[in-house]
């Protein structure tokens, strides 16, 4: 069994320092691929190293397969870790690197050879088994590091930013190989640390989005835990809404006109916008933030509320175009200078140019709404799981 339970996990490096990890509580099911993602300094690698037994837990309980492991040595936890730096022995061949950990623990020679062969076949390393690391590409070295973890047949695989040293093309290729590995070895759970939300969205069964900064002390480390589509369609707060998605969600200031069980009406730059949320906990007149993703904005003569904008910059990406837009507040408005730059993604070739004015349309079912504290109002439309 490889279920992993975190119960109110805390980490503080010194009594006079703030908590690095605060009240992390979540469960990773057997065979799940879970990604820890968040900004620099949020404690992603610290939380991973706690699972590995390389970092002490200040308080709380960590269990693997139903067994509390807080004080269990790393070698007895049934985990294998793949590091960012590969950590290969330069004087050993691929075969020797992959077999080394098993030899240290006194495994049978025939069993070692069989496990190395099986891992090499999975990772397409068989032709490279007798090469030294210096004769390998970056992607091949990373596959050897993964192979060294596979031969241990762990209950839990731990990946600490394994793609960060690779170029863009190799990152995509290796990401696909890791996804295939998870499919082929379905019994084992995997925890993967990255700062790249695209990696998180494409690899994960579940995502743990960790926050950094002062809110860790008051609201805890975990900003949201759920499936990639949960975080994309149902962000629980502004931090999640802005972190998940590329480009990030557009956020505009507004004020409630009406707050109902099925919808809210929001004044956004003088335009009344309907949002499909349950707004009963708020009152008319309260300050709110309206969010909508660049891919969900409409322009032209589509139905809905029209928001005036002016094109600042256009990027043509081939199959799509990205427009960067300045919202147009009322003339002489003191808030006009502080309005955030908006992003609109258009499929195909955009005909708009810099300086051109246009109208954006916001569909109620595609809008998000957040209160003054940044907490999301529950959406009232059926969304993909």
Image (spheres, grey):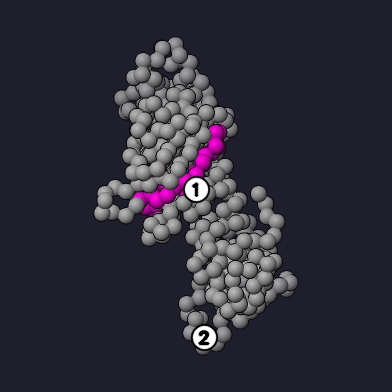
Residue at image point 31% right, 25% down: 91
Q: What residue is shown with label 2?
A: 333
Examine the image and state in which quarter residue 79 appears: top left
Find numbered disc 1 in the image and state the secondary structure of the residue it sits on.
strand
Left or right, 20 with respect to 37, comes to left
Query: Whole-percent x and y of residue 124?
Result: 51, 27
Left or right, 280 with respect to 245, comes to right
- Quick one: 140 or 45, which is closer to the camera? 45
Q: Tell me the mark number nearer the camera, choosing from 2 and 1.
A: 1
Q: What is the number of the mark on residue 164?
A: none
Residue at image point 68% right, 67% down: 261
Residue at image point 46% right, 49% down: 37
Examine the image and state in which quarter residue 132 appears: top left
The reply to whether the magenta stretch includes residue 197 is no
Query: Whole-percent x and y of residue 32?
Result: 55, 37
Which stretch is magenta? 20-47
Q: What residue is shown with label 1?
A: 208
Q: Residues within 10 Å of mark 2 (few under 14, many from 20)?
A: few
Query: Whole-percent x and y of residue 102?
Result: 39, 20
In space, the residues marked 2 and 1 are separated at their CA atoms by 40 Å
301, above or below 88, in the image: below
Left or right, 202 with respect to 150, comes to right
Q: In this view of the protein, can residue 304 be seen by the observer? A: yes
Query: Whole-percent x and y of residue 103?
Result: 36, 18
């Amino acid at each position: 069994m490889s279920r992993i339970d975190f119960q109110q996990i805390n980490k503080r490096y010194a009594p006079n320092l703030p908590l690095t990890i605060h009240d992390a509580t979540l469960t990773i099911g057997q065979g799940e691929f879970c990604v820890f993602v968040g900004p620099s300094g949020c404690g992603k690698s610290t939380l991973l190293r706690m699972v590995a037994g390389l970092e002490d837990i200040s308080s709380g309980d960590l269990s693997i397969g139903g067994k509390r492991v807080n004080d269990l040595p790393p070698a007895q936890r049934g985990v294998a870790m793949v590091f960012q730096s590969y950590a290969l022995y330069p004087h050993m061949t691929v075969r020797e690197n992959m077999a080394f950990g098993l030899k240290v623990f006194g495994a049978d020679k025939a069993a070692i050879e069989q496990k190395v062969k099986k891992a090499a076949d999975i990772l397409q390393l068989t032709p490279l088994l007798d090469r030294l690391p210096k004769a390998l590409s970056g992607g091949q070295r990373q596959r050897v590091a993964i192979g060294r973890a596979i031969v241990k047949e762990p209950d839990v695989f731990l990946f600490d930013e394994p793609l960060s040293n690779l170029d863009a093309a190799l990152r995509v290729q290796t990401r696909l190989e890791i996804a295939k590995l998870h499919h082929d070895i379905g019994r084992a759970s995997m925890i993967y640390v990255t700062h790249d939300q695209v990696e998180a969205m494409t690899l994960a069964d579940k995502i743990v989005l960790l926050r950094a900064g002062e809110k860790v002390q008051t609201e805890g480390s975990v900003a949201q835990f759920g499936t990639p589509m949960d975080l994309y369609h149902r962000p629980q707060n502004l931090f999640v809404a802005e972190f998940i998605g590329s480009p990030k969600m557009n956020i505009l200031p507004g004020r409630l006109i009406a707050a109902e069980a099925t919808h809210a009406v929001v004044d956004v730059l003088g335009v009344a916008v309907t949002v499909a949320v349950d707004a009963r906990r708020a009152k008319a007149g309260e300050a709110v933030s309206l969010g909508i993703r660049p891919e969900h904005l409409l322009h032209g003569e589509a139905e809905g509320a029209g928001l005036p904008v002016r094109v600042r910059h256009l990027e043509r990406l081939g199959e799509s175009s990205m427009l960067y837009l300045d919202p147009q507040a009322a003339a002489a408005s003191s808030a006009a200078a502080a309005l955030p730059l908006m992003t609109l993604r258009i499929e195909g070739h955009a005909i708009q140019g810099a300086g051109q004015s246009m109208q954006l349309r916001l569909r109620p079912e595609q809008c998000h709404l957040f209160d003054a504290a940044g907490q999301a109002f529950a959406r009232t439309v059926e969304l993909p799981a």
